[in-house]
Structures are given as C-alpha cells and as structure tokens.
Image: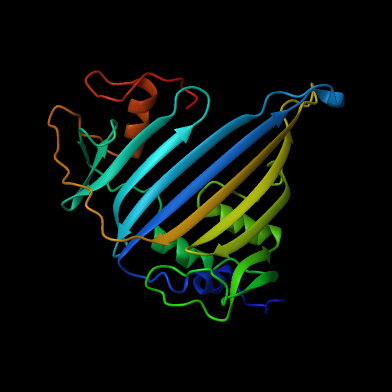
Amino acid sequence: MSSSRHLSLGPLYREMRAGLGDVGRVRVTVEFQERTFAAPGGGQGAAEPVSLVLVTFIEYEDRVLDRAQVALHGPGPPKRFLVARHGSAFAYSLDGGERWGRLVGHPRIFDLEEFEAELGEILVEDATYDVLDGSSDLQGPAGSGPRPEQFVDALDVSMDREAFLRLLRIFSTDVDDDPDAPALDAFSVSVQAADDVRLQYWWSLSDSVSEADVVPLKVRCSVSIRVAALGAEDNGAVRLDQALPDIADLDGVWAILRHGTPGVAGAQPGPDGL
C-alpha cells in the first residue's frame, strides 16, 4: 500500500487502536532496550554487549496519569520506583508501595496525549499490511464485540531518515540531525494490533570511539509502546510517610536510587553510571 504524500503515522496508529476507546482506564507499557558492541580495529575480538532495559508501566484514568512503575535493568541490581496520584499531586515509593513520599513536581514519564498528537507529524512513505480473517477463533478486546470478517493486524511502515529522527525526538529532545553525530545505519517501524495496539521500532547507530585506535562502536536500540484497555482496579490509598523527604522531580528519585539516602527503604547506593 503506497501512501499519499500527506499520510502520517498518526492515522495509521489511530486505526489500529480503534476499539480500545479514548477514555476510561488505559495501561501504557514503554520498553526501551539498548545494546552496545565495541571491537578493536581489524575485527579481532569483540567486547561483551552492554544491555540497558528501561521498562515503564503507566496507567491513565480519563487520560490523566494515575499510577506508574519504572524499572531500569543493567549492570548491577535493578532499580525501581513507583509514582501514584495523591489528590491533586503525586507521590513516590522506592519499596513497592509500602511507604510513600511527596513528589513536589508533576512527573513527566510519558505523555500519552502528546505522544499520539506528535505521531501525526511523522510522514510515511509506504506501508505494507497483513490482513487476518476475523472468522477464526481470535477474540477481540473485551467489550469491543466480534472481530470484523477481515481486519488489519500489522503494518510495516517505511519512512525517510528525517521522519524517523522526528520519531526519536518524541523521547529525546536532544536528537539533532548533526553531521558529526553517529551515522544512522538502519531503522524499522511497525504497528501491530490484537488485544492491544503496539508501536515498535528499532534503529542501529555506528561511530568510532577513537580515531587513533579505530575502535568501531555499534549501538542498537529498540522502543516498544503498547496501549491496552484496563478494567477497574483498586490500588489502595496512598498515605504519605512524613519521615520520607520531599522530592522535587523524578531526577531526584533517580538520585536516591543511585546514591542512597539514609532512612529511605529500597534505596541502595549504586554506580554513578546508572
């Protein structure tokens, strides 16, 4: 399916999401993975890959952030924290929700409405789709009714480099088309739908650590965003523990996870690199 000149990723995403609904409780899962490979010049040997996995579970109620869990997996013990709405403000927890401290600022983890709006700015060159037969035993999302006789299950989307960099900028404000930046070797984007809708994309970068040593560096990253309907759940009331310090923003939460703070359960000193 060749796209028109003005087709963007936004309507494709909305078409795949049709049936989940735009209001009520929604769970968003954001998963980021990065693998780094470095090898001496001449291709002799290769370093062990460095894997960094950031997994975020975010729940919205009427498109307002209600609760989130963020976990970072890499070298050393995993680091996790929770964020939950507390009245008109928010709270944080480092011990799985046993104790909650006050989060002074509004946590910016993932803005679903902003993300979906920005997808409309990403132009598509071509889209290849798979059509499934809805008369099989496949079941649709709860409350969505029976599957149509035929429906689009997956889209592989083609776009140019500039459009892909715009997709990266959704998660990073410092991604610039800099001629001195690592070369963008390859990238791929796909949208899938089942009981949820998923936008998945990966990209590969390459650079040299040192011109003198000629050590090639290859970095492969991937992002998966999954949106699914979520039924009513009772997460329990959030009660602030006055013994825990007020934290201005999520950078402060990460600082506690990295360096530790006396009296804060779940916080353990960690390396500065995480």
Q: Position of residue 29 (x, y in %)?
A: 44, 51
The N terminus - image quarter: bottom right
| Colour convention | rainbow
Establish if 115 lies above or below 265: below
Residue at 55% across, 59% down: 199
Q: Position of residue 54 (x, y in %)?
A: 48, 39
Residue at 32% across, 33% down: 253
Viewer-side residue, 138 vs 56: 138
Quadrant hosting residue 164: bottom right
Residue at 37% across, 51% down: 58
Establish if 103 lies above or below 190: above
Q: Position of residue 157 (x, y in %)?
A: 66, 65
Quadrant hosting residue 251: top left
From this viewpoint, which residue is outermost toward the right?
42
Establish if 82 lies above or below 197: above
Viewer-side residue, 162 vs 268: 268
- Horizontal side of 99 relative to 126 (left or right) equals left
Q: Position of residue 256 (x, y in %)?
A: 33, 26
Q: How many marks?
A: 0
From this viewpoint, which residue is outermost toward the front?
137
Residue at 54% across, 53% down: 169
- Horizontal side of 51 relative to 77 (left or right) equals right
Quadrant hosting residue 124: bottom right
- Horizontal side of 34 relative to 128 (left or right) equals left
